[in-house]
Image (cartoon, rainbow, N blue to C red):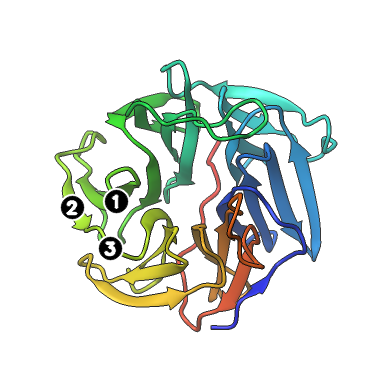
Amino acid sequence: MKWQAVCDQRFTLAEGPFWDDEQAALYWVDIAGFRALQLHRQEVRHWQFNEPVSAFIPASAGDALVTLASGVYRLNLNSPADQPELTLLCVADPVEGNRANEARCDSQGRLWLGTMQNNLDAQGGDLPLERRSGGIFRVDGDARVTALLSDQGIVNTMLWPASGGALLSADSLDGLIYRYPIRPDGSLGERDIWAHEHPRGTPDGSAMDAEGYVWNARWGGGCIIRFAPDGSVDRIVELPVSHPTSCVFGGPDMTTLFVTSARPASGTLELDGCVLSAETGIKGTPSHRFSG
């Protein structure tokens, strides 16, 4: 695959890519830079916050959600970069000292949010991770919050196989991707290991293609692993970055893969911290807007 940067900027911790097919726009965040960004018609816009932001997801109402350390907010996309207009939607995780990490919407437009101990200081610098205090929460369009899991390390990846009835989610501290059955009442059942540890990095964010294969960014592994629907390794896709963080399918035919990455403090590659894109020839599944 031929990888290229979607813009000239480098980011400390780019994450959470989202492709909005309606606007043909790419959304992502720089968690440690406290910024949410949008690429539309070759123009990059951003909104600057004073705390970590882990996801930036358009909403059906015409605004967008941003998952900040202090809660889930609605962002007025017409507000200026240095004075973003925010309205609190909910505080999903009540644990003091936690922050949002992974966030995706399911096909019903409900936000699934994974949290973790906040590991960033007021300037975006690293703090030690000392506890498994994260969780997984579901936020409905009316802002109703349902707590699904607790005692999680670093929640990454939120995907729902087309067969339905299950959630795929990684805990990066464990190095595993789990499968959780979704019970009829919406709660999560006992998990199984779906994808085991692999020497090529730690599981971070993922995208799913139309064939049900999972494209998983491997933190520290410089690659994406494409897992078959049964969790076995199908192929390894090499990347020109050392710390890919997540990926999403988009573009006019939904065959372009966008990959976010982090820029480590030392030993960096030229493209570390970029948002990359490449044509895969494989159709991906769409991102879903928040229903509220």
Q: Residue at x 22, y 37 (%)?
A: 188
Residue 257 or residue 265, whichever sits in front? 265
Residue 174 lies in quadrant: top left
Badge 3 marks a residue whose secondary structure is loop
Residue 102 makes an appearance in the image: yes
Determine the residue positioned at 53% across, 41% down. Answer: 291
The C terminus - image quarter: top right
Mark 3 is on which residue type?
Answer: His
State yes or no: discs 1 and 3 in contact (Cβ < 8 Å).
yes
**Crowd around label 2: few <14 · some 14–19 · many ≥20 (10 Å):** some
Relative height, residue 137 to residue 173 (above, below): above
Which residue does the numbered mark 2 point to in the structure image? Answer: 193
Q: Under tag 1, what secondary structure?
A: loop
The residue under label 3 is: 198
Residue, disc 1: 175
* CA separation in Å, label 1 and label 3: 8 Å
Q: What type is the residue that disc 2 sits on? A: Ile
Q: Position of residue 155 (x, y in %)?
A: 38, 41
Task: Specify the amino acid type for callout 1.
Answer: Gly
